Amino acid sequence: EAQVTQNPRYLITVTGKKLTVTCSQNMNHEYMSWYRQDPGLGLRQIYYSMNVEVTDKGDVPEGYKVSRKEKRNFPLILESPSPNQTSLYFCASSGPGGPNTEAFFGQGTRLTVV
Amino acid sequence: QKEVEQNSGPLSVPEGAIASLNCTYSDRGSQSFFWYRQYSGKSPELIMSIYSNGDKEDGRFTAQLNKASQYVSLLIRDSQPSDSATYLCAPGGGATNKLIFGTGTLLAVQP
């Protein structure tokens, strides 16, 4: 089954404790991206990747890091989480054409930073 | 001016009516346009894509695109309570490689 898998689904952590949210897709997609979703602000793109070893900032990259060492994986790293990073996070991937084609989303990760 | 603008709603329509959702975008280079549906707490899922000016119909859904006016809309005919969700507009690509979404319109279909 074609899918995008995020882990964990729910995470509560403390300020400053480094964490990683994993994202994996099995569709051989080149384009992958991370979003955060907050009430009233919609989906905002954090980072995106056009292919292996090619990443670029989205609209809200501050406080986040990503890496793309393999085509299927695109982890999101919070080196020193802060309460303002409490949000619902989505990973997405798209096939040839990248942002001009359908995006497939993971199930979401609800992160709470206390 | 926001890159993608949608009325946040809620848009309330009675069951069986036509729901009309609108979206304007600022990037004239956008060539592809998508409508996603998102139920509360769930992931967005694609319901319509449109690439050319005019109308595109798929079942109860019709997408309309006017590139000159930088306007895209979604019509839902015979609205059902199960259509109650947030609808996200996403103009693809354009001048950047970002996939940007509007803030979404909350649709409530009243039985």
Image: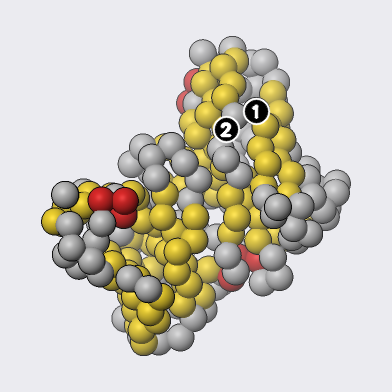
Residue at point 66%, 55% (across, down) = A93
Residue type beneath disc 1: Pro
Relative side of B4 to A99, left or right: left
Disc 1 packing (10 Å; few <14; some 14–19; many ≥20): some
Image location of residue A12, percent across then percent down: 56, 17
In this view, B73 is above or below B52: above
- Along the viewing direction, whichever of B61 and A79 lies nearer the viewer: B61
Q: Is residue B41 left or right of residue A72?
A: left
Residue found at the far right of this picture: A69
Q: In this view, does A73 lie to the left or right of B67?
A: right
The three-letter code of the residue at mark 2 reads: Thr
Residue B64 visible in this rendered orientation of the protein: yes
Secondary structure at numbered mark 1: loop
Dot 1: chain letter: A
| Residues tagged 2 and 1 counted as in contact (Cβ below 8 A) | yes
Q: Mark 2 points at which residue?
A: A109
Could you tell me residue A29's position as x and y percent?
74, 60
Real-space Cα separation, disc 2 to disc 1, in angstroms: 6 Å
Please say if A53 is above or below B89. Answer: above
Q: Is residue A32 visible?
A: no
How are the residues colored?
secondary structure
Q: Which residue carries the number 1 mark?
A: A8
Q: Are marks 2 and 1 on the same chain?
A: yes
In the rendered image, residue B1, in percent from the top left (x then y), is placed at 34, 61
Residue at 76 percent across and 52 percent down: it is A26
**Crowd around label 2: few <14 · some 14–19 · many ≥20 (10 Å):** many
Compare marks 2 and 1 and give the one earlier in the sequence.
Answer: 1
